[in-house]
Image (cartoon, rainbow, N blue to C red):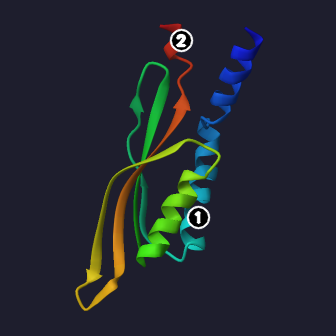
Amino acid sequence: MEEMENTFGALLRQLPSDTEVPGLLEDITRTGLGSGLEFEEIKLLPEAVQQFYIELPIQITVVGGYHDLATFVSGVASLPRIVTLHDFEIKPVDSKVPTKLRMSILAKTYRYNDEGLKK
């Protein structure tokens, strides 16, 4: 039982609370800038409430080279918080400069829904 509680506690620490979301956005931004990307958009979308967690979607649009985009995705996957990446689209910014790409991606992070246990 103690081992299960320790595992559960470790998993909960990966779910940010409300007050940690700004820090997560800073981490995502820092990861993108450190990868050599330019941010066009980073926008919080409406939350999706589930029984045990709340999904926090973040729409991100960045511009950079192919390898810079890959470095960014890898960096986001390495963050200490759970962040999943969905629905990405990569297109050239300009047909005259095919190496400069725009990536639109939906990042989702999650926070614990303690109200779900009360139902």
The numbered mark at residue 73 is none
Dots 2, 1 in contact, CB < 8 A: no
Q: Residue furthest bottom?
A: 96
Tag 1 residue: 31
At horizontal 54% and vertical 52% (from top left) the residue drawn is 77
Tag 2 residue: 117
Query: Please, what secondary structure does the residue beneath circle 2 have?
Result: helix
Residue 60 percent across, percent down from the top left: 41, 60
Query: With respect to residue 67, does 111 lie above or below?
Result: above
Residue 99 percent across, percent down from the top left: 35, 84
At horizontal 47% and vertical 30% (from top left) the residue drawn is 54
Query: Please, what secondary structure does the residue beneath circle 1 have?
Result: helix
Q: Earlier in the sequence, mark 2 or mark 1?
A: 1
Q: Is residue 56 visible?
A: yes
At horizontal 69% and vertical 15% (from top left) the residue drawn is 4
Can you say which quadrant of the picture contains the N terminus?
A: top right
Q: Is residue 38 visible?
A: no
For the residue marked with disc 2, what is the amino acid?
Leu
For the residue marked with disc 1, what is the amino acid?
Thr
* Residue 5 figure quarter: top right
